[in-house]
Image (cartoon, rainbow, N blue to C red):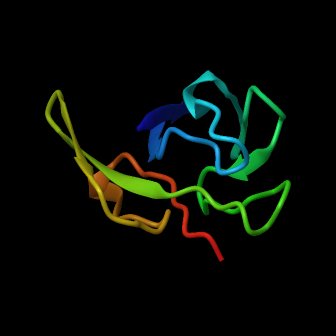
């Protein structure tokens, strides 16, 4: 599991890049774009869409903040969440 903070909004994705299995937690986030450290493949954190290759999607997981705790739900979750559910996540389902 890899966690990302984009301007206070949290996202959780599977940790491995679908390209060659690199650890995405070593990647960089700029705006909505996550860039893998190994080969610079890029993904949209909100949609999970592969920006380098459309078939290479990220699996996103829902995060829920309860006080000081974060709860991770291991299910695909769209980026649009209710405002009260604070953190969001990222997604992958190979096409």
Q: Is residue 69 above or below residue 88?
A: above
Q: Nearer the viewer, residue 10 or 37?
A: 37
Q: Is residue 16 above or below residue 43?
A: above
Q: Nearer the viewer, residue 7 or 61?
A: 61
Q: Residue at x 55, y 62 (%)?
A: 92
Q: Is residue 31 above or below residue 43?
A: above
Image location (x, y in percent) of residue 31: 72, 39
Q: Residue at x 69, y 63 (%)?
A: 49
Image location (x, y in percent) of residue 62: 34, 55
Based on the displayed image, in which of its 4 quarters is residue 65 positioned? top left
Q: Quadrant of the C terminus?
A: bottom right
Is residue 7 in sight in this rendering?
Answer: no
Q: Quadrant of the N terminus?
A: top left
Q: Nearer the viewer, residue 95 or 91?
A: 95
Q: Residue at x 64, y 43 (%)?
A: 17
Q: Residue at x 42, y 51 (%)?
A: 88
Total number of numbered labels? Answer: 0
Residue extending farthest front: 20
Is residue 73 in sight in this rendering?
Answer: yes
Q: Is residue 51 left or right of residue 10?
A: right
Q: Is residue 77 left or right of residue 19?
A: left
Image location (x, y in percent) of residue 3: 45, 34
Image location (x, y in percent) of residue 43: 71, 50
Q: Is residue 58 above or below residue 34?
A: below
Q: Is residue 49 left or right of residue 42?
A: left
Residue extending farthest top: 26
């Amino acid at each position: 599991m890899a966690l990302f903070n984009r301007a206070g909004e949290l996202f959780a994705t599977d940790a491995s890049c679908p390209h060659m299995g690199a650890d995405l937690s070593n990647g960089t986030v700029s705006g909505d774009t996550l860039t893998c450290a190994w080969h610079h493949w890029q993904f949209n954190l909100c949609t999970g869409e592969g920006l380098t290759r459309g078939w290479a999607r990220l699996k996103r997981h829902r995060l829920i903040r309860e006080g000081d705790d974060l709860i991770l739900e291991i299910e695909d979750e769209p980026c649009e969440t209710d405002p009260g559910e604070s953190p969001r996540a990222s997604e992958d389902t190979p096409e």
